[in-house]
Amino acid sequence: MRLLVTGGAGFIGSNFIRFYLREHPEDSIINLDKLTYAGNLENLKDIEGDARYQFIHGDIADFNVVDFLLKDGVDAVINFAAESHVDRSINDPSPFLRTNIAGTQILLESSRRNKIPRFIQVSTDEVYGSLEPIGLFTERSALRPNSPYAASKASADLLVRSYFKTYNLPAIITRCSNNYGPYQFPEKLIPLFVTNALSDEPVTIYGDGLNIRDWLYVDDHCRAIDTVLKKGKAGEIYNIGGNTEKTNLEITDIILNILNKPQSLKKFVKDRQGHDRRYAIDSTKIKMELGWEPKYKFEEAIQKTIQWYIDNREWWERIKSGEYRLSNEQRVQSNE
Ligand code: NAD
Ligand code: DAU
């Protein structure tokens, strides 16, 4: 198979590319990425020279680039590309609308014209809004997005649905819970708190810290997408979750304990606007119909993740100091 992966220089996309090429030695991947602040080619350094892998610097909202790549013959499009951070969407929603909605529509339109046999939209449990205090999100739960990020992802999901219903584009939507693992940009809860604690800097807990997320190790998400790519049914939605509900305070304590750092690093700050209280996923459908379930236990995978940030200090220090951004901008300019 020849895949077009979008947003492959980000956290989940880069983990997916590495996972997929390892699992499928005969296949190849084109990675289309705009290299926003979250895109980092250092995430893929180890496979840069692999003949099965090709990087294209470009925007999913640019029809000409997308159509040029899809005309060349691609067996599946997997759309990871997005503006992905809720806090940034609260500060400025517009880039979220452009990439997450308009960009997805351009990928869909070019996929339709080029008769692409498989389209996977990597969506999120945030489209369902907040669950309080009991129950689980199923694929039939109503869409009640609460942040501009979640609203943009829900809008993209509706466009995907419409391309399936109207044009028979063989598209599938996956909705996953919170991921953690190597190469996650240090603005998200786990990598931010791990790297702050490693630098003896405060960890900023929003509100009372009792908001709940359902955590999944990134490799399990990658395997779920691979499973959906191979066995999923066109027009369907598949929820993907970790069965691991934790409050933010529990996550904070786990990190501080593993790193042997003091409780005094905890700093309670103003709550996020419109902060969703709880997410929890029912993954029965993907388990029963496609045979996927998480392999990693949270207790082991969080240790492994924290160890990765300890061992790869240079990776996150270059991001946090702004050094990566600068060298990347120079590299991009010299390539243009
Ligand atoms: P990320 O922010 O780490 O990476 C996003 C990538 O997309 C970056 O490489 C960026 O450069 C690229 N990108 C952004 N705009 C682009 C554009 N216009 N054209 C081409 N590339 C562009 O995000 P992530 O955490 O890896 O999330 C990947 C996908 O998974 C997103 O669609 C997100 O909504 C979804 N998701 C994330 C999580 C999570 O916990 N992180 C959970 C469920 C679903
Ligand atoms: O549920 C899937 C979603 O998970 C993905 O769609 C998003 O792309 C991804 O960013 C993530 O969204 P969250 O808002 O849940 O993740 P974040 O890491 O930003 O925050 C997790 C929780 O931690 C949330 O309740 C807010 C809280 N938090 C976060 C930060 C950055 C803090 O208390 N302090 C912080 O400094």
Image (cartoon, rainbow, N blue to C red):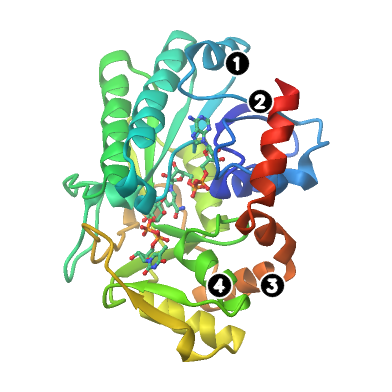
Q: Residue at x 67, y 73 (%)?
A: 307
Q: Quadrant of residue 76?
A: top right
Q: Position of residue 150 (x, y in %)?
A: 29, 45
- Under mark 3, the amino acid is Ile
- Under mark 2, the amino acid is Ile
Q: Residue at x 31, y 76 (%)?
A: 209
- Under mark 4, the amino acid is Asn
**Label 1 to label 3, Cα distance in Å?**
38 Å
Q: Disc 1 vs disc 2: which is toward the camera?
A: 2
| Quadrant of the picture in which ligand 2 is shown | bottom left
Check the image and report above or below for 279 versus 63: below
Q: Position of residue 138 (x, y in %)?
A: 24, 53
- Which residue bears the numbered disc 1? 69
- Which residue bears the numbered disc 4? 196
Mark 4 and mark 1 in contact? Answer it, CB < 8 Å: no
Mark 1 and mark 2 in contact? Answer it, CB < 8 Å: yes
Q: Earlier in the sequence, mark 4 or mark 3?
A: 4
- Packing grade of label 1 (10 A; few <14, some 14-19, many >=20) is some
Q: Position of residue 272 (x, y in %)?
A: 28, 62
Check the image and report above or below for 102 versus 218: above
- Which residue bears the numbered disc 2? 56
Q: Is mark 4 within 8 Å of ligand 2?
A: no
Q: Residue at x 19, y 62 (%)?
A: 131
- Which residue bears the numbered disc 3? 310
Q: Quadrant of residue 189?
A: bottom left
Q: Secondary structure at mark 2?
A: strand
Q: Earlier in the sequence, mark 1 or mark 2?
A: 2
**Label 1 to label 2, Cα distance in Å?**
9 Å
